[in-house]
Image (spheres, rainbow, N blue to C red):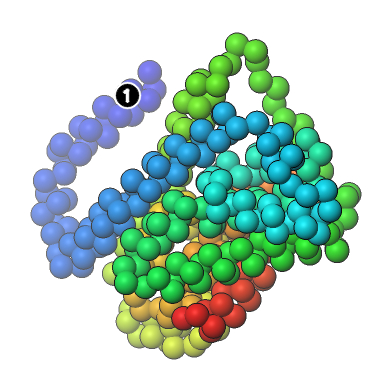
């Protein structure tokens, strides 16, 4: 009832002041903002929908035991195998955290599960195709994203094997599913949740990117982008704050034309692995102590990997 009244109020206000507001906002700056925002949103939505469709299907129809049987028993070998699995098993950031927790509960070594957690939303086919569309004529950007992201996921898995402590990982109990819930219902619920959740972040990210392009003075942009390290750190930090879904973040990165290819690569490598919503999800699933340590280390490794791969390929 309250929601209906609020919606009616907003619609009434829009009808009364909408035309006058649109006239006042009809400036070159606002038209540029609107063009960038619409372009990013329209380009990103099909990939977002396709990615969430596949992610929901995997969560509903693929048993977690499949991963356990496919991975080697040796943890050192299981980590790169799990990281490479992200190439063929798509998943959005939100879905990868509960999937990794489910793998751990079924006996998969935590290092391998964490490698999959990082790689699935970063190097899956939907993300790579979206990157190719966002950067037409630049196959080196797609290759750089694949190599840098895979390197981060495997490095973090091995880093956990060497330095991780079991007491840091406080795995929360999963919510028990009811027998009445069928596979198709799980698929529908997962698709609805992931698409609405990730779609909201896409819109916010597109608005922020458009605002960034229009509002930030060119002098500031030149000062930041002129420094190789500062530009990389700036876009890496922006990726953490914007939390754009990995199926659409390439379009946001492509719109940041004032920055170097390496800085935009850092935006695409860091975003699917470390952002504000992922840190919260990890804290709720694995514990706060784990989330703080893991996200901090992942951010540092992702920035370093982006710089090295960018210097090599871009």
Say whether residue 255 is left or right of residue 120: left
The answer to whether 300 appears left or right of 93 in the picture is: right
Percent coordinates x, y for residue 132 in the rendering: 37, 63
Residue 160 visible? The answer is no
| Horizontal relation, residue 135 to residue 69: left or right | left
Residue 74, percent across and down?
84, 53
Mark 1 residue crowding within 10 angstroms, few (<14) / some (14–19) / many (20+)? few
Residue at x-position 12% and y-position 49%? 20
Q: Residue at x 30, y 29 (%)?
A: 7
Identify the residue shown where x is 46% and y is 32%.
Answer: 191
Q: Nearer the viewer, residue 177 or 125?
A: 125
Identify the element where label 1 is drawn: helix
Query: Residue 307 at x, y = what percent?
Result: 57, 79
Determine the image quadrant of residue 32: bottom left
- Please determine whether, in this image, residue 147 is positioned above or below residue 125: below
Q: Is residue 186 left or right of residue 22?
A: right
Quadrant in which the N terminus appears: top left
Examine the rendered structure and indicate whether residue 193 appears above or below residue 121.
above
Write the residue at 74% across / 40% down: 68
Query: In this rendering, does residue 130 appear at all?
Result: yes
Looking at the image, is 122 positioned above or below residue 176? below
Residue at the top extreme of this rendering: 180
Total marks placed? 1
Image vertical order of residue 264 relative to residue 65, above or below: below
Q: Position of residue 157 (x, y in %)?
A: 74, 59
Give the residue pinned by disc 1. Answer: 5
């Amino acid at each position: 009832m309250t929601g209906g009244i609020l919606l009616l109020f907003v619609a009434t206000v829009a009808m009364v002041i909408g035309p006058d507001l649109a006239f006042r906002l009809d400036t070159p700056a606002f038209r540029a903002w609107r063009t960038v925002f619409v372009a990013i949103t329209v380009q990103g939505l099909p990939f977002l929908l396709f990615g969430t469709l596949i992610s929901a299907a995997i969560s509903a129809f693929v048993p977690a035991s499949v991963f356990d049987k496919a991975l080697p028993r040796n943890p050192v070998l299981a980590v790169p195998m799990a990281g490479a699995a992200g190439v063929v098993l798509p998943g959005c950031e939100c879905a990868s955290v509960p999937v990794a927790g489910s793998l751990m509960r079924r006996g998969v070594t935590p290092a391998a599960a964490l490698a999959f957690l990082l790689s699935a939303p970063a190097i899956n086919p939907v993300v790579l195709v979206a990157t190719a569309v966002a950067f037409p004529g630049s196959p080196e950007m797609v290759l750089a994203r694949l190599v840098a992201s895979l390197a981060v996921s495997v490095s973090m898995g091995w880093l956990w094997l060497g330095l991780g402590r079991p007491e840091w990982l406080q795995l929360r109990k999963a919510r028990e599913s009811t027998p009445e819930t069928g596979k198709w219902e799980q698929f529908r619920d997962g698709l609805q949740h992931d698409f609405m959740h990730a779609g909201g972040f896409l819109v916010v990210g597109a608005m922020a990117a458009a605002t960034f392009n229009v509002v930030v003075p060119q002098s500031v942009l030149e000062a930041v982008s002129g420094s190789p390290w500062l530009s990389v750190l700036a876009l890496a930090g922006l990726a953490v704050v914007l939390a754009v879904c990995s199926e659409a973040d390439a379009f946001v990165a492509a719109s940041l034309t004032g920055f170097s290819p390496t800085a935009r690569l850092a935006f695409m490598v860091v975003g699917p692995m470390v952002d504000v919503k992922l840190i919260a999800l990890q804290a709720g699933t694995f514990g706060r102590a784990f989330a703080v340590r893991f996200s901090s280390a992942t951010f540092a490794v992702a920035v370093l990997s982006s710089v090295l791969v960018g210097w090599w390929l871009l």
